Amino acid sequence: MTDTPDLKPLKTWSHLAGQRRQPSEYEIVSTNLLWSTDDEMPWSLAPDVDMNQWYLKYRDACPLKHDDWNAFRDPDELVYRTYNIMQDGQEAYVDGLLDEHNARGHDGELSAAWLETLALLYTPGRYPLHALQMGSAYLVQMAPASTIINCAMLQAADQLRWVSRTAYRTKELSLAAPDLGFGEKERAHWEGHAAWQGFRELMERLLVAYDWGEHFVALNLVAKPAIDEAIVRQLGNSARHAGDGLLGLLMDAHRIDVERSRRWSKALIDFMLQTDGNKDALAQWVAKWAPLGDTAIDAYCAALPEAGDAAGDAKRAAEEFRAGLGLGR
């Protein structure tokens, strides 16, 4: 009779045992969570099922390759618990801004011209912000590693928070200026005004870019930087010039999330560049999408009052971000 060796039971984080230290909370709850990447067929369904075919085409056949996608790590090592703790403080700060400015009668002090600008260029912004949220949610569905998915999920949560804040301010502004169409005309502006048509084309094309790698490039390297630089930064600058300190401070708070998104995007690009051939694919996608981002910035910034070279500043900032990734345009 053959002796059966004593087998030690596997721990929950056995896949991390090779690092010879107790894994962190981030590593335990974020790594190696996908089971649809274990076999040749993504899901435990017949090969010709549409969902299988979708993942085979748009995830597994993506031009971007890596021997171990699960080795990617978020530089901030955020998980749902720590994200909520962090953003609870951030939301409390934003609530304080709103309460303080409301107590001072802030909206009643805004000029008629600036209120018209807000109705045209600020409150319709929940449409592109929601499109960013949907794009981030698609990455949650399609990325090949749970650590990438986790970053995209928290990015989607960021965008939802700012959609909500924009909607909240829309209601407040409708009370301050009931004749300007706040809460009523945003869709018409988004669909018809020249200032928004570049962003509308960019976001509509983005949402049908199904390859996960191209979608990531179009979203995090082009569309989001274009929106962040034109709307978050340049509209925020215009707000301060117009005496709207509240919007300027709200945009500053928004930029905290922008910087965190850029950190994980850069970390993922650095990770991708470890594999030969990925740089060419990434650069081709940037070259394809960046002109759409520039066109969107030009159209939007042209409508900003007393903007100076807002479009040039926004395009340069977006380009500098991509240049820092080693991808040029």
Image (cartoon, rainbow, N blue to C red):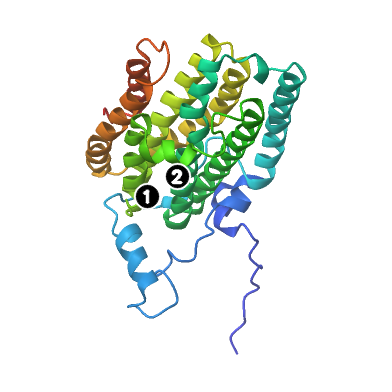
Of the numbered discs 2 and 1, the one sitting upstream in the chain is: 2
Can you see residue 270? no
Residue 74, x across and y down, in percent: 52, 40
Q: Is residue 277 left or right of residue 241?
A: left
Q: Is residue 223 left or right of residue 295?
A: right
Q: Residue furthest bottom?
A: 1
At 36% across and 16% down in the image, what residue appears? 313
Q: Mark 1 points at which residue?
A: 207
Across and down, in percent, residue 138 comes to: 44, 53
Q: For mark 2, what is the residue?
A: 131
Label 1 element class: loop
Q: Quadrant of residue 10?
A: bottom right
Residue 44's disc number: none
State which quadrant residue 78 falls in: top right
Residue closer to the observer: 80 or 305? 305
Q: Are marks 2 and 1 in contact (CB under 8 Å)?
A: yes
Q: Which amino acid does label 1 sit on?
A: Leu
In the figure, is residue 224 to the left or right of 273?
A: right
Hey, what amino acid is under mark 2? Ala
The secondary element bearing badge 2 is classed as: helix
* Residue at the spot 53% in from the left edge and 32% down from the top edge: 123
Whether residue 29 is visible to the viewer of this picture, yes or no, is yes
- Cα distance in 3D space between marks 2 and 1: 8 Å
Q: Which residue is drawn at 37% across and 9% down?
A: 308
The residue located at (23%, 39%) in the rendering is 288
- For the C terminus, the quadrant is top left
